[in-house]
Amino acid sequence: MQVISKGMRATQLYLPNNPVYQRAVDNIRGAFRQVWQATDDLIFDIGETEMRWEDHAVYSQAQRNESIAWTLYKDGVRSLTFKPGVEDLEIVRFLAVLHQAKNLQADAPDDLLTLLWAEDFQFVNYTFRELASENAVPIERGETAPPIGGGGSGGETAGRGVDPSTIRRQVEEEAPPKREGLVSVDDFDTTLYFLDDKEIEYLHKEVEREYAQDLRRNVLAMLFDLLELQTYGTVRSELISILENFIPYLLGAGDFRSVAFILRESKVIQQRARELIPEHRQTLESLPLRLSQPDALSQLLQSLDEAAGHPSEEELSELFTELRAEALITLMGWLPKLSNERVRELVKTSAERLATTHAAEVLKALGSDDPAVQMEMVRLAGRLKLPGAPDGMGVLLERGDRELKLVVVEALTTIASPNAVRLLEKAIDDTDRDVRIAAVKFLGQRGARNAFPRIEAAVLGNKMKDADLTEKMTFFEAYGALAGTSGIAVLEKLLVPKTGILARKEDPETRACAAMALGKIRAPAARDVLQKVAQDKEPLVRNAVSRALREVGG
């Protein structure tokens, strides 16, 4: 019965020479032949919404306008029998009769029973009931209507019926004359049947369902069916042209889900369509690429950001999922410009998807001439921890402005790959103070031994002479973390004041930094050195020693 239901829709939508139509009919015939292996006939009891075989519901459809059961039931058919051989010719004619009956007008001279009778089926039998008498109470034989006008004398005999025309004439004579200009219900033809509440509710639901249908999606599905099954080159060229011209219209109408549907189905057609010539295949492959081009995508993003009403997140997600790698640079450039938070999040998600799967596009975006694109791509690479991204960040770290270099260092510390650490080692000698501090702090915490010579040279040389306390502290703490116990002697010389008139004395800031560096070594020997100056007269040094002792556990 499910196969028959699907076949009925196919025979309504397609012509007999269409492969979809022919495949549906073949499926019905195959299903019947399987049934005839187990039984000699099929007898169904027909209800309003279901068909039963041997008290088992084998077909049910609550939507009456799509229900085979309701089409039969509403015109009085109460049982239906199929016999072997029906599948050869009569089943297609039977489905055609059902379709014709569904579309009959209320004032049509024919009904389903008349159409069935006219076909004179040999392998389809049915029983029906007269609708007017189905629920009537039977009148016992011999009963008569009472005479009009009372009394039996001079009137009708008890056993004789009353002529309806006599009753109508008598009522008209006894009724008072109608006033001129008065409107009466009798002047109008009233319907024979009135709708109950359930039927009215059903009509409302059906109207709502009809208006809620996505007609564009239905049309597109039919176009793709034809594109798959029709092998004629001219037909396919015309269908592909229709799809191409349809995309701008859908974008303008804000129907992004249908655009995504076109792009997805285009990929499916390339796999399933028979005898698809290279020209058609190339055109279908180019559809997603066109949407990913800078001009088209920029116009789309601007329209989304400026629109008063926005599509749902699901619709935009479906569309952005179909974007190609070429769209990454455009998406990165638009991220800082978008004011709508929902659109920005969707663009960011789409960019993350493209960046994860297309490393070459990431490097291309990092090499863009647009600083905004570079900035957003660096942040995205750091957020996703893309291991190949540092290959394109070296130039940015050398030539970029201060803000960009800080973002690069932050991304490199997040990625933390060997290439990222190598670039951070170079950042130790950067001209910008904040870049140096961020790089050195990460290298010290990570224990990057390759960075030790640069950090040692800065600590023991003159580079820290003009640095502020924060930068000095960062370099010294990194030195202590990387040097270990071998650096205790060097730091002791800087921390413990020398005796003698000619002995060189370090400034309080340098001594405080040396104390913090010893705190990072966390060894007994380092604690012993710190305890020597625990009561130093310089408050800055004394506070630094106190903090360092807490770190080493002293």
Image: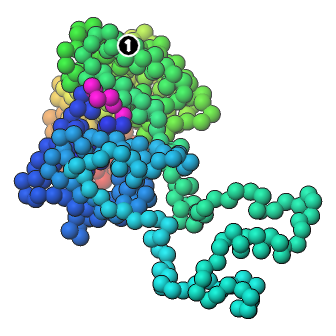
* Name of the residue lying farthest toward the top: 279
Residue 221 visible in this rendered orientation of the protein: yes
Residue 348 visible in this rendered orientation of the protein: no
As drawn, is 163 to the left or to the right of 206?
A: right
Q: Position of residue 91 (x, y in %)?
A: 25, 44
Residue drawn at 50 percent across, 82 percent down: 139
Front residue of this view, candidates 474 and 240: 240
Whether 266 is among the magenta residues is no
* Name of the residue lying farthest toward the right: 180
Judging from the image, the colouring scheme is: rainbow
Magenta stretch bounds: 13-18
Residue type of the residue flagged with mark 1: Glu
- Residue 145, compared with residue 546, is above or below; it is below
* Name of the residue lying farthest toward the front: 154
As drawn, is 304 to the left or to the right of 147?
A: left
Residue 97: image quadrant is: top left
Q: Position of residue 479 (x, y in %)?
A: 25, 32
Residue drawn at 36 percent across, 45 percent down: 118
Q: Main secondary structure of the magenta part?
A: loop
Q: Position of residue 495 (x, y in %)?
A: 30, 37
Residue 23: image quadrant is: top left
Front residue of this view, candidates 287 and 299: 287
- Residue 294, compared with residue 319, is above or below; it is above
Front residue of this view, candidates 506 and 486: 486
Residue annotated with mark 1: 238
As drawn, is 246 to the left or to the right of 187?
A: left
Q: SS of the residue at dot 1?
A: helix
